[in-house]
Image (cartoon, rainbow, N blue to C red):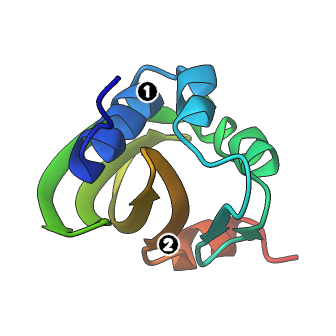
Amino acid sequence: MLEQAPAEVVGRYFAALASRDFELMRSLLADEDFRSRSPLSSYQDADAYIANISRVGLILERLLTRKIFVDGADVCTILDFQFRISELQTVVVAQWSTVRRGKIVSIETIFDASEYLAMFPE
């Protein structure tokens, strides 16, 4: 089987997130040496990461890809995450993913988390 290009792997990851297919999302992450970092959390384990990100599925209304940049194994995706907590909110997110051997090995997510943190001050 041919290995998918990094942009295809990341595209499948976001399509799985949009459809709340967390099993497919997990299958696209490396089993070993996975890491993730965002303004809210960091993980060294793909299963723990998916357990956390699956909670986003409860409030995610829509996911819109604005731009994708590819540099070898690195894929930077600029997205609009539309959430519904009490009202619809859009958060612009940049996600830098690195793909090796057809699996995502690292994810760095960058966004303004100030509104989210204000909801949970502790």
Quarter of the image that includes the N terminus: top left
Could you say which disc has been placed on residue 41 in the image? none
Task: Judge from the rendering whether residue 77 lies leftward or rightward of residue 66; answer left or right.
Answer: right
The answer to whether the residue labelled 2 contacts the one labelled 1, judged by CB atoms less than 8 Å apart, is no
**Is 100 placed left or right of 45 in the picture?**
left
Q: In the rendered picture of this protein, how many numbered marks are placed on residues?
A: 2
At x 35% / y 49%, what residue is drawn? 81
- State which quarter of the image contains the C terminus: bottom right
Residue 91 pos. (x, y %): 36, 60
Residue 79 x %, y % = 26, 55
Q: Residue at x 54, y 71 (%)?
A: 115
Q: CA distance from mark 2 to mark 1?
A: 18 Å
Q: Amino acid at mark 2?
A: Glu
Residue pushed farthest front? Answer: 1
Furthest residue in direction right, as rendered = 122
For mark 2, give the secondary structure: strand
Circle 2 sits on which residue?
A: 108
Q: Amino acid at mark 1?
A: Ala
Q: Position of residue 47 (x, y in %)?
A: 78, 43
Is any part of residue 88 visible from this angle?
no
For mark 1, what is the residue? 16
